[in-house]
Amino acid sequence: MCIRGLVMSCLCPQDQWENALHFYNEALDVKIKVLGREHVDVANTIENIGIIFAQQGRYEEAMGRFKEAHGLRSRALGPDHPDVGSTEYKMALVCEEMQDVASALSLCHQALTKAVKCYGQDHPESDKRRQVLARLQSLPATGQAAWHR
């Protein structure tokens, strides 16, 4: 783990999100300069920023970062890569928090399909996504469509 990663892992449990965001944004600037805007490591850092926003309840900002990371990962790794599915899973959870059940269902289904294809039916990642999908299917549908905005 790099020093920034170690520092951020220590800050986040203490609810020091703004400090973590500062470090992630600094890391993002460096990665863009060194690796270029389309590099998968840039997508990873953008997704981490999205996770912090989601932890803070800043769901619109989180969704924006997840969409950006999703696009970068899809282009860099291909649309069927498990990391793309991981981003879709996080997006589904944010959509659920935003009470956009329709988008959450769609994204979770995509994430589950990728997990089963990559890891197999009985893998813990597949199970986790299957459980969330079942929970989402039990909720009343709403039509916010945050994913498609």
Image: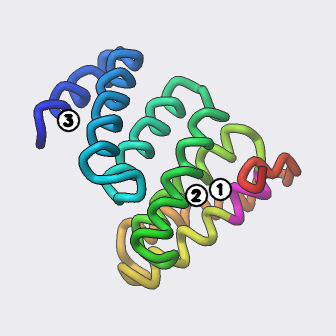
Q: Is residue 102 shown left or right of residue 116?
A: right
By secondary structure, the bulk of the magenta-drawn segment is best described as: helix
- Judge whether residue 100 is colored magenta: no
Label 2 is placed on what type of residue?
Answer: Val
Label 3 is placed on what type of residue?
Answer: Gly
Residue nearer the viewer, 79 or 116: 79
Callout 1 touching callout 3 (CB < 8 Å): no
Disc 3 designates what residue? Answer: 5
| Segment tinted magenta in the rendering | 101-106
Query: How crowded is the residue under tag 3: few (<14 C-alpha within 10 Å), some, or many (20+)?
Result: some
Label 1 is placed on what type of residue?
Answer: Arg
Q: Find numbered disc 3 in the image and state the secondary structure of the residue it sits on.
A: helix
Q: Find numbered disc 2 in the image and state the secondary structure of the residue it sits on.
A: helix
Query: How crowded is the residue under tag 1: few (<14 C-alpha within 10 Å), some, or many (20+)?
Result: few
Disc 2 designates what residue? Answer: 132
Callout 2 touching callout 1 (CB < 8 Å): yes
Residue 135 is tagged as: 1
Q: Find numbered disc 1 in the image and state the secondary structure of the residue it sits on.
A: helix
C-alpha separation, residue under disc 1 versus residue under disc 3? 32 Å
